[in-house]
């Protein structure tokens, strides 16, 4: 696998000088909107409150981030002017509203947004989340596969890295029902692994996987603790199946649980993290006390990120060192076919 010049540049923009991803997610919509709406006792959260919190996250947390993941609805309109241009800009493309059927969930893009638009606005990468269950109805799986392939093809056309997020979820007959953007209770590791194996196929064009823990967060011991080797084997298999740079998402796990997850992920070859709630949810629990929220972001949240970043520096695999790029790593030479192809078309 070769990276085109644009994709390589986007990957470098997301990473630090050593090729490690230390990325913060500010694109969450339901996890923020629902909590604010609950406080007010309303069906919808006031736009101003959601936007204000996202702007604060950008302002404070970018200091310890290599890149920020922003959404077009809130974070980009209110926070783009605050984003340090030295930080990578990842833009989410999937709508937070999904279609639910007896056969499974179906994703879609945000209205009036596209890979082309993200390219025009100066985004460094495109992120898309797809809900996926390998045991969902075939018609649903086919829709999700076509959705992903379409975006992967557009990312190749516009020469932007495709950062792809996978989440398993409860089907209609499952006991653990939730529509929240949280880890599914009782998820099966095989469902996570089979999903990764499907979308690692070259036709989807995934450049970086954003993956959930294959084992429920509460059951991840952390490398070196009792029972860690059995859990490590599952993480190792996930990394093998991904076969390219991959990062971990937090899915609402608390700080301690997510750090334990990261020790396993780095042992298995992960190149960093793209996390949100593990970093900022504790501070957000103080809503609507904005002063306390900001104080805790500047204190506990940044301290936590520094600890994660130290772990990342010590244990993560640089993205350019993944075997998929061959013995020379992820580099571009002027004579490469991929270089000529992109620029001859332009």
Image (spheres, rainbow, N blue to C red):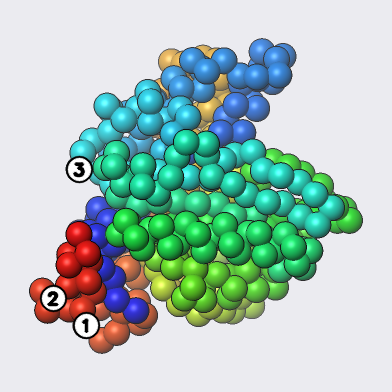
Q: Is residue 336 above or below residue 136?
A: below
Percent across and percent down for residue 280 are 48, 35
Q: Residue at point 66% right, 13% down? A: 40
Q: Is residue 18 above or below residue 177?
A: below
Q: Earlier in the sequence, mark 1 or mark 2?
A: 1
Image quadrant containing the N terminus: bottom left
Is residue 262 among the parts visible in the rendering? no
Secondary structure category for the residue under label 1: loop
Q: Earlier in the sequence, mark 2 or mark 3?
A: 3
Rendered image: mark on residue 328: 1
Q: CA distance from mark 2 to mark 3?
A: 24 Å
Q: Residue at point 26% right, 68% down? A: 4
Percent across and percent down for residue 169 are 72, 54
Q: Earlier in the sequence, mark 1 or mark 3?
A: 3
| In this picture, residue 89 sits left or right of residue 24 | left
Percent across and percent down for residue 41 are 72, 14
- Residue holding disc 3: 86
| In this picture, residue 50 sits left or right of residue 252 | left
Report the label total: 3
Q: CA distance from mark 1 to mark 3?
A: 27 Å
Which residue is most to the left?
334
Near mark 2 (Cα within 10 A), the count class, few <14, some 14-19 or many ≥20, is few
Percent across and percent down for residue 210 are 49, 59
């Amino acid at each position: 696998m070769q990276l085109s010049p644009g994709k390589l540049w986007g990957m470098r923009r997301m990473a630090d000088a050593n090729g490690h991803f230390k990325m913060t997610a500010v694109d969450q919509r339901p996890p923020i909107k629902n909590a604010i709406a609950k406080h007010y006792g309303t069906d919808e959260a006031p736009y101003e409150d959601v936007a204000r919190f996202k702007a604060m996250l950008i302002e404070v947390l970018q200091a310890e981030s290599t890149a920020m993941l922003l959404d077009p609805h809130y974070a980009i309109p209110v926070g783009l002017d605050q984003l340090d241009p030295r930080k990578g800009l990842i833009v989410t493309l999937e709508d937070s509203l999904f279609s639910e059927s007896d056969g499974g969930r179906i994703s879609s893009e945000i209205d009036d947004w596209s890979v082309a638009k993200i390219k025009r606005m100066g985004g460094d990468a495109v992120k898309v989340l797809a809900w996926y269950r390998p045991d969902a109805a075939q018609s649903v799986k086919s829709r999700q596969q076509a959705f992903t392939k379409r975006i992967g093809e557009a990312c190749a056309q516009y020469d932007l890295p495709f950062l792809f997020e996978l989440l398993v979820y409860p089907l209609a007959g499952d006991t653990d029902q939730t529509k929240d953007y949280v880890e599914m209770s009782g998820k099966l590791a095989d469902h996570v692994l089979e999903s990764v194996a499907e979308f690692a196929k070259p036709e989807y064009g995934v450049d970086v996987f954003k993956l959930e823990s294959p084992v429920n967060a509460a059951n991840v011991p952390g490398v070196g603790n009792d029972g860690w080797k059995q859990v490590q084997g599952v993480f190792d298999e996930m990394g093998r199946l991904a076969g390219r740079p991959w990062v971990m998402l937090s899915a609402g796990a608390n700080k301690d649980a997510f750090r334990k997850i990261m020790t396993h992920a780095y042992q298995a070859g992960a190149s960093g993290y793209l996390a949100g709630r593990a970093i900022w949810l504790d501070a957000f629990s103080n809503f609507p006390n904005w002063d306390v929220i900001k104080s805790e972001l500047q204190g506990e949240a940044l301290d936590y990120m520094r600890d994660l970043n130290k772990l990342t520096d010590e244990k993560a695999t640089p993205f350019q060192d993944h075997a998929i790029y061959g013995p020379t790593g992820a580099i571009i030479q002027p004579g490469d076919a991929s270089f000529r192809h992109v620029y001859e078309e332009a």
